Image (cartoon, helix red, strand yellow):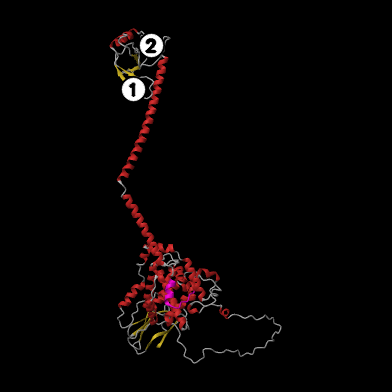
Amino acid sequence: MITPAFELSQDPDFLTIAINIPYAKVSEFDVYFEGKDFKFYAKPYFLRLTLPGRIVEDGREKASYNVDKGIFTVRLPKETPGQYFDGLDMLTALLAQKKSRSAKPLVEEITDTAEEEEEEFDWEIEQTPCHETAESTLHLQCCYGFGNLKSGVFQRLQDELSDVIDVKDPDLTPADGRRQKRLETEATKFDPDHYLADFFEDVVIQQVLKYKPWWVDAYAEKMASEGRSHQEHVISLSEEEREQLRKFTNKSYLLDKRTRHQVYFSLIDILLAYCYEICITEGDKNVESSWNIRKLSATLCWLESFTNIPEVLVSFGRRVLCYPLYRHFRLVTRAFSDTVMILQLGKSAVLKCLLDIHKIFRENDPAYILNDLYVTDYCIWIQKTKSKKLAALAESLQKANLTKAHLGFELEELESAALLVQEEESELKAVSAVSKQQLPSSELETSDSEESSSTSSSETESSDSDEQESSTSEDGKINSLQGTLQEERTAPLTDCNGLGRDTDTLTLDVSNEKSKASLQSTSVPGKLIEELGKKMQTAIRLSEQPEELATASYTVLQGKGANYAVEPQRLLEDPSGKEHFLEVSPKKNLLLFVGSTNEDED
């Protein structure tokens, strides 16, 4: 037989059951209902429900079948009009069989009717001395899981152990030992630098805190409809979630009072981790979602069993500041308030969150073990829990108080020290900025003058070097000129046409001073010019130069059509020590050298 998909809804007077039975033989079907029992059969589908309220057959019941959609709908009148049936979306609980009320004993002795043949006892069996065993070693098999009902699981799953939980040898480590090791590990993992970085640079954290998950709007709707006569159904499950509920096997859990409290406290721990993950990812779960949820929940990661609500809050707060990417205390308080809202919405909201966690772990390879240990049992158990219990749990959680001092990491001292350092750095920056602004003008002028002097000195050095190079080159030219003049004693003073040029001449001081060479314009006495003109016409040599001649000069004659320059030929000294003038050279670019004489000698 196939259990069909179904959905229940209600109004003040009727209960409506919609059953999806595609390809069923509708011509032959059976419907039976009485009190809290409902049965439906249409080959190959069979459905049996245990309803949360009583229904009655009084002629107002109706049934219909939509052939196109394959949905069979039946409306059944309530025995008490106006009664609200709670838990219509708890499909696993609705599929449970009705409890037997027979008087059969819970434990029966089963014996075999066949007589067993007696075997001869071996008296020669090997014996070993008896050793006293301590009472504590008789219970080495430690319990964990939902309601501490599991044990010995990780002995068969050693390969997946390190990827799922942090505790080593959970089957041999008692609850107190697990808690002590957890606290030591958290103290080692806490990083003050990471915490302070998120404390001061909280742009991303402020952004994710603005996200509103689905339970925020649902809670607002519930508060708006709080004044109505009965509780309004505000949480709906998706078809995928309903399908998952139908796959669960119904179970009954025998829990004592202490164990029930531990189950409720562990439920808070798991919901806190889930709320943190939804807030950080803004509802868009990723491959790290499974790791975040099980790492932040000490119940899932360390198989922890809590005894009160403050222990749960402190454990969750410590783990938020040790493991995930974003470590901020406001994320702890945000998950705290979200968990309160989910519990106040009732078991349908809690079930929806548990089914989402179940899906996350089911899609992660090593985390599926946690579904077998905790989440699946929670999904089944929560459907049978009374909403009043969850409301009381939410009220107790809301009254709880959690501060940074409770976490044991000295967060307030760290923040105060970091703020002092930040203030000192800001003051130092302000002082340095003011000192730069208040720098004396004299220092600025001094620095400017130093820069200008350095610039001028560099320019002076470059100019001196240029002058030295130019003077050196000029001295070299003058020396070479003097040498040439000494070699050539006389030179022609006529041009290529044999004509003399009656022009003013530029004299060049050719003394041995190396510091400068200056050109001076001088005037030659008239008599000498006349004599030179006559001598040039007759092409005779110039007379000898007087000893009192002070300087030697040369004249550059340059014309438009052709350039005439006097080239030094030879200036020799005779045995008497008298120097002679150069003769006019017939070459172009003649350079005329004349000697200055005194008028007395003329």
Kind of residue at disc 1: Ser
Q: Quadrant of residue 411?
A: bottom left
Q: Quadrant of residue 422?
A: bottom left
The residue where tag 1 is placed is 518
Q: Which contiguous range is marked in magenta?
A: 303-316
Vertical position of residue 543 compared to residue 84: above or below: above
Q: In the drawing, what numbered circle is on residue 439?
A: none
Vertical position of residue 197 compared to residue 558: above or below: below
Query: Tag 1's secondary structure?
Result: loop
Query: Tag 2's secondary structure?
Result: loop
Kind of residue at disc 2: His
Alpha carbons under labels 1 and 2: distance apart: 24 Å
The residue where tag 2 is placed is 580
Is residue 201 among the parts visible in the rendering? no
Is residue 436 among the parts visible in the rendering? yes
Q: Is residue 344 magenta?
A: no
Which badge, 1 or 2, comes first in the chain's sequence?
A: 1
Q: Is residue 309 magenta?
A: yes
Image coords of residue 529 (percent x, y): 30, 11
Q: Classify mark 1: residues with Cα within 10 Å, few (<14), some (14-19) or many (20+).
A: few
Where's the C terminus, which quadrant? top left
Q: Nearer the viewer, residue 494 or 581?
A: 581
Q: Nearer the viewer, residue 373 or 75?
A: 373
